Image: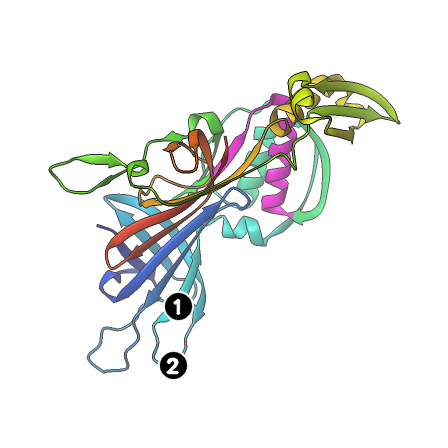
Amino acid sequence: MHKLFCITNNKQYDITPLVGTISWKSSVDQLGVQLNFEDAYNDDRYFPMNPVDLGSMVVLSNQFEVYRGMVVKEAKNGRSPIQYNSFDFAFYLNKSKAIYQFNGMAADVAIKKILTDFNVPVGSITGIPVPITKIYPGDVVSDIIKDILKQAELVTGIKYRLEMRVDKLYIENQKDLIIAPTFMLADIFGPLPVTSAISNPSRSRSIEEMKNNIKLTNNNKVVSEVKSDYLIRKYGLLQEVQSIEDKDLGKAYTIAASQLKDLGRIMEENSIVVPGDDNARAGRLLEVTEPITGMKGLYLIKDVVHTIKSGIHTMQLGLGVA
């Protein structure tokens, strides 16, 4: 059973009995998780005091800690339930700007330096030995981290995913984040895969953003070209041309091959609603078989919205090609 706690002025309160709907969401396009909840309002003198305030810490637990964050917004409307928005501690990286100049520093070392400067504890960061040489003249800190990872992905072909877990930041190889979420229908059945109870499935496939021929140029000269003859025969020529800097000339083929791997495919935008599992969050991978739409295979969770209402936990997953 999920419980929501509030920590205000170093005192912890169990606010579960006061809270109505709880929802939390994450997206691969954003660093961090947002949790929203509504707190009952009553001006009766005997009604329990509401301990929640801006800056309060809220903790969602369910056997283990699911989420920890800070209340950043409060909305009151008459005697209606009070609406609260909270964010995990990636909030500070999303709302702060910084100046950095890296001269060949390894990507993982550069990210650790940034996190140290902003007092963000590190859970673990996989080794990323790609040298970063770039000036950031006052960019949003989370954007700097994402840009560093994007540079590394072009060289290594590896997708890296960031997660705040409780109060620590983790960066891992996406392929290591396969999950098999479950739910309990009844004790006699034991845990069942959430994908056995899919509702509202939708699937959209497109080749509009496909690129099957990648050319990299430097000083108006083609320095590398990687293409898929199979995709060109099947869908026609869909070409991408990008310019690279002198410092990347030695990695031109690797960068082009990585771009073709990422862009040379049918793009999908899918969604499903399933029973909730706390382990489902954006950036992780999930095996899905859904006969109505034809979804079958390993999918990336691009975004997820968890909702707990009247004690029932559901989640809506936005899925893309892994």
Residue hosting label 2: 78
Circle 1: residue type: Gln
Q: Residue 216 appears at what percent x and percent y?
A: 78, 25
Pointers 2 and 1 in contact (C-beta within 8 Å): no
Q: Dominant secondary structure of the magenta stretch?
A: helix
Closer to us: 127 or 208: 208
Q: Residue 30 appears at what percent x and percent y?
A: 54, 46
Q: Is 280 above or below relative to 217? A: below
Q: Residue 163 appears at what percent x and percent y?
A: 46, 39
Q: Which residues are magenta?
A: 140-162
In the figure, is residue 112 to the left or right of 271? right
Rendered image quadrant of residue 311: bottom left
Say whether residue 173 is visible: no
Residue hosting label 1: 83
Q: Residue furthest right?
A: 220
Q: Is 42 above or below relative to 139? A: below
